[in-house]
Image (spheres, helix red, strand yellow):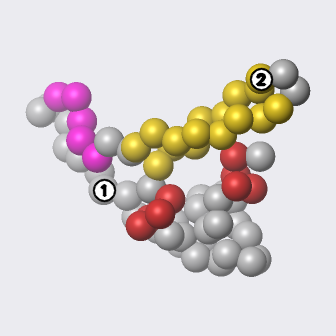
Amino acid sequence: SAAGNRHESRGGHAREDYPNREDANWMKHTLTWLIDDTIKIDYRPVHLYTLTDDVDVIPPKERIY
């Protein structure tokens, strides 16, 4: 449900109808839960920082297989 809702390919979720990754609209975490037999989908932003200065930020990049 969550992966099928994305109109892009990302990581292991490859779609023939949306073959490319699209960070402009889909750089976010997908949250899903079930309420009364209905799947609810929402999102939260991806934080591109670490919680300590001891760890470097690793920017996202497309996976090449």
Q: Which residues are magenta?
A: 48-52
**27 or 36, nearer to the observer:** 36
Left or right placement of residue 53 versus residue 14 in this view = left
| Residue 13 placement (x, y as % from top left) | 69, 59
* Residue 35: assigned label: 2
Which of marks 2 and 1 precedes in the sequence?
Answer: 2
Q: Residue at coordinates 84% horizontally, 22% vertically from top-left?
A: 36
| Residue 40 placement (x, y as % from top left) | 71, 35
Relative to 20, say whether 33 is above or below: above
Q: Residue at coordinates 46% horizontally, 39% vertically from top-left?
A: 44
Local SS, label 2: strand
Local SS, label 1: loop
**29 or 12, nearer to the observer:** 29
Count of residue discs:
2
> Which residue reaches farthest left?
53
Query: Label 2 is placed on what type of residue?
Result: Ile
Relative to 27, say whether 57 is above or below: above
| Residue 32 placement (x, y as % from top left) | 67, 34
**46 or 25, nearer to the observer:** 25
Left or right placement of residue 50 versus residue 54 in this view = right
> Which residue reaches farthest top?
36
Query: Label 1 is placed on what type of residue?
Result: Pro
| Residue 20 placement (x, y as % from top left) | 58, 76
Q: Residue at coordinates 82% horizontally, 32% vertically from top-left?
A: 38
Q: Which residue is mark 1?
A: 59
Q: Is residue 49 magenta?
A: yes
State the predominant SS element of the stretch in magenta. loop
